[in-house]
Structures are given as C-alpha cells and as structure tokens.
Amino acid sequence: MTFLPCCCFCPSCLKTIQGVSIRGSLFDPSQTHQNISHDNTIHALASGDVGSPEWHQYPPASPTNAFPDIFPTDVGYAGATRPGAEPGLVATAPSVPIHTGAPQLAVPSRLPKAKGPFPGAKKHFDMFQSWGSLSPWYSIERGHFGVDSGPEAPESCRITGLHLLHRHGARNPADYKPGSGPGGLAFRLHANATSLKATGPLSFLNEWTYKLGQEGLSAYGRAQLFDLGVSMRMKYGFLLNNFTESNTIPVFRTTSQTRMLASAQNFALGFFGFPYDGQYQQVVTIEAPQFNNTLAPFETCANNNVPSKGYRGSSYVQAWTDRYLKDAVHRLQRHLHGYTLTVNDVYAMQESCAYETVVLGYSKFCELFTEKEWEGFDYAADLKFWYGVAFGSPVAKAQGVGYVQELVSRLTETPLETHNSSTNATMHNPVQFPLGNSLYVDATHETVILNVITALNLSSFAKTGPLPSSHIPSRRTFRSSELAPFATNIQFQLLCCDSKPERQIRVIINDGVVPLTGVGACSKQKDGMCAVSTFVEAQKETIRTKGWAYACSGEWDVPAGPAWETTTGEPPVMEE
C-alpha cells in the first residue's frame, strides 16, 4: 500500500490549521502579493479568498459505497437484558452534579493586558461565561440568585413533577450577507480582499475564510442537548414510573425550525436513548408568521416587529459598544491596512469568536480582546436582551403570557378555553396537550425564555432596575449569560412536603433556585418554594390584566432611550 506524504495534497483538498483556511497562497501563487515597506519589511497581502464562504456538505448526496441492505443493525443475538430502577438524583442525592465549562471547546490561555476590570466584574474571569446569550449554559452557583438551596429535594419534601422549558443548543449565526454579525464582517473583508494586509495578532486574517453555516445546530450544540437529556433523566427519571402505571408515554413540544427540532430530538436521544421511537411523542408546532405559537410568540406579535418597540436595545448596544470598544478599534487598526475598521466590525469580531468556538471548536478572534473588553461584550448582550425581550421591553410580558397560560392549564389540569394570546387552539386537545402528566418538556428560543421570566414576574432579576449604556453597574441582577445561554433551562419543580399542607412549586434556572417573592402573595421561603395555588393565582392575575391585544396590536409609542422606561415588560398604560 502506498501512502501519500503529509505535504502532498490532491487538488480538491484543503488544509486547515487552528480554524484558519489555507487556500489562495498555498495552492495558487498568483493570489499571493507582497508589499515592501520603507523599513524593508516584507508583508504578504491577503489572499483573494479572505472572507469568502467555505462550506462543506456532508453527507454526500449519493455516496457510491452506500449499501444499507447489507449493513443491518438488527441481526438478532442481542443477549438478555432487563432494565433496573429509574434514576432520581434530585430525590436521592444530598446535592446534584454541577455543569461547568465546555470540554469539547477551547479558548485562549492568554489575552491582551488591560488596565483593570469594570466595576462589578466577576472575581474569576471565564470567557465561556462572558458571551451573553452565546455562552454555553452552566450551573449557577448555589445562593447566587438569592436562595440558599439547590435542585435537590428540600428536607421532608419529595418531587412529584417537572415542567422543563429549555433553549436550543449552540448554533451557527444568520446568513453570510451584507449587514451585521460574523457574516457581515466576512462579506466586507472579502470585498476589500485584494487590498487588505494584516499583521501581528491579525495576521491570521490574511488567509481567513468564513466557515460558519446558517443557523443550524453545531456538533457541540447537539452534544449540549444530548447531555441535557441525560442530565434530566438522571435527575428525574423516576417520574417515568407514573407513565408506566397509567400506560401512557410523555408528550414533548418544539417548533418546526431546523435547530429547534434537532435540539428536541437530541434531548430525547439523551433522555430516552436510542431508539427513542415509542418512548415519547413529539409535537412540532409551526414557527412561521401568522401561526400562533407560545414557543415562538414573536411571529404573531405585530408590535414586536416595530423597531422602536421590539428592538429598543439596539440604540443602547450601539452607544455602549462605541464606548467600550473605542480603544480596541485603534489597537487593532494598527495591524490592518487596506481596510478601515469600525466599532461594528470589531464587535462582529467578538461575535465571531463566540460563534466560531461553539461551531468549530476554537477561534483566533478570541485572542484579540482583553478580559475587560469581554466583560463589555457580555454587558452589550445584557442591554440587547433587557430592552429587547425582557423587563425593559414594552412587549416582553405579553409575548411570555401565552406560555404562562399553558403552564397554569397544566398545573390546574384545566383545559385552556380562551385563546387570546399566542396560544394555538388547534394544538390544544387531550392528545397533543395532555393534562395530568408528571413530566413536560418544551423547547424554545432564548428570547422566549426571557419573555417567560418577565411574564412570571420573577422580579429579583429586575431588582437593580434599567441598565445604563454609559457604564456597567457595580451590581446588576440581570445577566443574559446566566439566564439565556445556549441550552439554558428552566425547571418548574413540583413538590409535596410533610411540613406544607399544599403542593409546592419552585423555579430553577440553570440549577439556580429563584426567589418567588415577586410572584403575587408568594412569601420568602428558605428553599424558594411557594404553594401552587398561590403561584397560580398570581399568574391568573397577570393573564387577566396584561393584555396581548393592546401590547402586540395596540397603537402606542415609546420614545427611544431612557426618556421612557419599564421594569415590568409592559407598554405604557392605555389612556382612558
């Protein structure tokens, strides 16, 4: 057998080193140019491929060696097996495992030096926790949200049910086209490729190509949801005994968007194992304009598409990026000739770091910024989401109220008869929306997670009030990297306790127990519990008084910036 030496490449081959595509200069010398500066230093001009899309299609459309008939997986002789008891960490263990880091991903070991962190910065910098909603999910430290308790059952209590709401896993960004984000940056660099010349820390740009796809789950994103499914089976597997006793199987929900369905399926693979057919039923709701959907309410909330109402965070983010990235623009511009960087370009480089890491495993863009600049990036995401889809948005509560209606319906085992929000009457029947189950799992987007947090009035996250665009507050209770990262999850945990006459509920976000003191008459409890009846009554009051029609279709306006603020996610009061 003859082996090709490692330095030989077939014409269709492509060598990639540390995420940098080496094409033009390696295979086509005509695309490599040199420039001799006054000090006789030779700088290579960038390849003409800089910023161009590089997309790989797998699997091939018609592989020549595919013979499925002679590769059966069921050949008999499986051997005898018998299932054991279901796991139940939250019921049996004194504490549950915490989820930290991202073992499949890598970040730089060194970053440029900065004068010092912003006030209120975390004591220990973690890049994975500094990307806002682009961060991988991680367990919140016990007590961080204000309740000194964990997901495990409190003393004298037993867990009787779980309603899980989770986000999809890490994904590719939006399309490669002019505009914002990594794709927009790549498009602009490619348009100037023949004159672009990068040196020093930016030298990788000379042969950098755009390798990100469009919005689909990454391999790491698939792993996140698989791992989340395994984690939930280990914690709550004992709840499946209720289905065995009733001779039924669970019904989970997701939306039709590719990354949403793939996330739900990977979760199921982790939770049930392969094959999962016959172990549960998957409702796939249509995510598209004019289709009511509580897992994608933005599709039918008209005012959400009005920039001054649904995208209030944009001006705040721009004002903040102009401030915190000012030095970075000047520092990086010294190493880039033939193209003038803007603040938006440099912000897109930070976005590229996060996306390339969760899609490709590592990104050279991550090496360009100081810890302080990553803290600034994290805060930019907080501004975007606070004013766009959370407590600072005039349409946030209305968009979250549909899911709250469904939660109340499940908690009270009462069919939903009035559909006056984003709920879809065609999907509310005993088969697709069963009541009385001990386990529910719904997959959604990070924007909807924050809509729901707002609609539930989990006001501890709004405690420090509106976020300024001039500085990072020394103490802030709203952090998107904690509430809405990739694969973020909310556990609505139901309990029966010897010391409580009624069923109790707890809200646990990424393993952090949330205080319910802002929810109606729920009082401060050591373990964050509230009587289900009290919790439900508070949500019913929200449903009665916070109308979808006015917030989403009403004629009202709000000025841009801090001239008008809300900390409850509601529009201005309707004039009589």
Image (cartoon, helix red, strand yellow):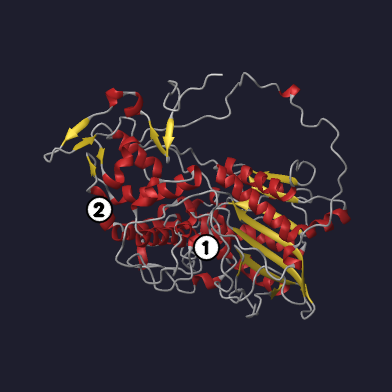
Q: Residues within 10 Å of mark 1 (few under 14, many from 20)?
A: many
Spatial separation of the CA atoms under disc 1 and disc 2 = 30 Å
Instruction: Tell me the amino acid under the disc marked 1.
Output: Glu
Place residue 165 in its image quadrant: bottom right
In x, y percent, where is residue 393? Answer: 47, 62
| Whether residue 200 is situated above or below residue 22 in the rendered picture | below
Contact (Cβ within 8 Å) of mark 1 with mark 2: no
**Residue placed under numbered mark 2 in the picture:** 331
Q: Residues within 10 Å of mark 2 (few under 14, many from 20)?
A: few
Which amino acid, by three-letter code, is at mark 2?
Arg
Q: Secondary structure at mark 1?
A: helix
Which residue occupies the foreground of this view, 352 or 438? Answer: 352
Q: Position of residue 555 (x, y in %)?
A: 46, 57
Of residues 272 and 501, the one nearer the viewer is: 272
Residue 391, given in percent of the width and then of the height, sits at 49, 65
Give the number of the mark in front: 1 or 2: 2
Which of the pair 376/362 is nearer the observer? 362
Residue 144 placement, left or right of 507: left
For the N terminus, which image quadrant?
top right
State left or right for residue 471 relative to residue 539: left
Label 1 belongs to which residue? 482
Q: Residue at x 71, y 71 (%)?
A: 94
